[in-house]
Image (cartoon, rainbow, N blue to C red):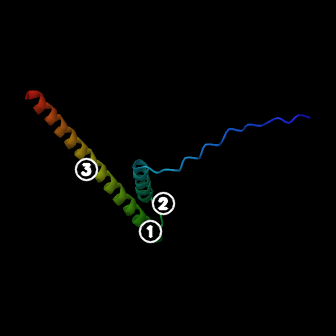
Amino acid sequence: MSEQETTAAPEAPAAAPSVTVNDLVNIYNIIDLASKRGAFQANELSSVGAVANKVKEFVDHVQAAQTAAAEAAGEAETGQNADVKSEGDA
């Protein structure tokens, strides 16, 4: 009998699970909707509310940071464009 080599392709590493800010917004909306529909018992409301508040605070913080970064990038770009215009005028 002859031996045949088996060549198996190396497995690609599994991508790490990720959660985006959009996912967190959706989680908050689901919690909000479920609470409006009465899905939680009275004794669960404080812990559900605490989680919802933490998610909302985190989303607000990240979105504010993203907005600030976008504004800073816009200001930097505007400043660069002003430099180019002034050099062209000279």
Identify the element where label 2 is drawn.
loop
14 and 62: which is toward the camera? 14
Total number of numbered labels?
3
Q: Residue at x 68, y 38 (%)?
A: 9
Q: Which residue is mark 3?
A: 68
Q: Position of residue 16 (x, y in %)?
A: 53, 50
Q: Are marks 2 and 3 in contact (CB under 8 Å)?
A: no
Identify the element where label 1 is drawn.
helix
Q: Amino acid at mark 2?
A: Ala
Looking at the picture, does residue 39 appear above or below residue 80?
below
Q: Position of residue 8 (x, y in %)?
A: 71, 38
Q: Amino acid at mark 3?
A: Ala
Identify the element where label 3 is drawn.
helix
Q: Which residue is mark 2?
A: 39
Q: Quadrant of the N terminus?
A: top right
Give the Cα separation between the discs numbered 2 and 3: 37 Å
70 lies left or right of 29: left
Q: Position of residue 49 (x, y in %)?
A: 40, 65
Q: Are marks 2 and 1 in contact (CB under 8 Å)?
A: no
Task: Give the foreground label among 2 and 1.
Answer: 1
Q: Residue at x 27, y 48 (%)?
A: 69
Q: Residue at x 23, y 46 (%)?
A: 72
Give the Cα separation between the discs numbered 2 and 1: 13 Å
Q: Position of residue 74 (x, y in %)?
A: 22, 41
Q: Amino acid at mark 1?
A: Ser
Give the Cα separation between the discs numbered 3 and 1: 32 Å
- Disc 2 or 1, which lies upstream in sequence? 2
Q: Which residue is mark 1?
A: 47
Check disc 3: other Cα within 10 Å, few if <14, some if 14-19, many if 20+.
few
- Disc 2 or 3, which lies upstream in sequence? 2
39 and 20: which is toward the camera? 20
- Disc 3 or 1, which lies upstream in sequence? 1
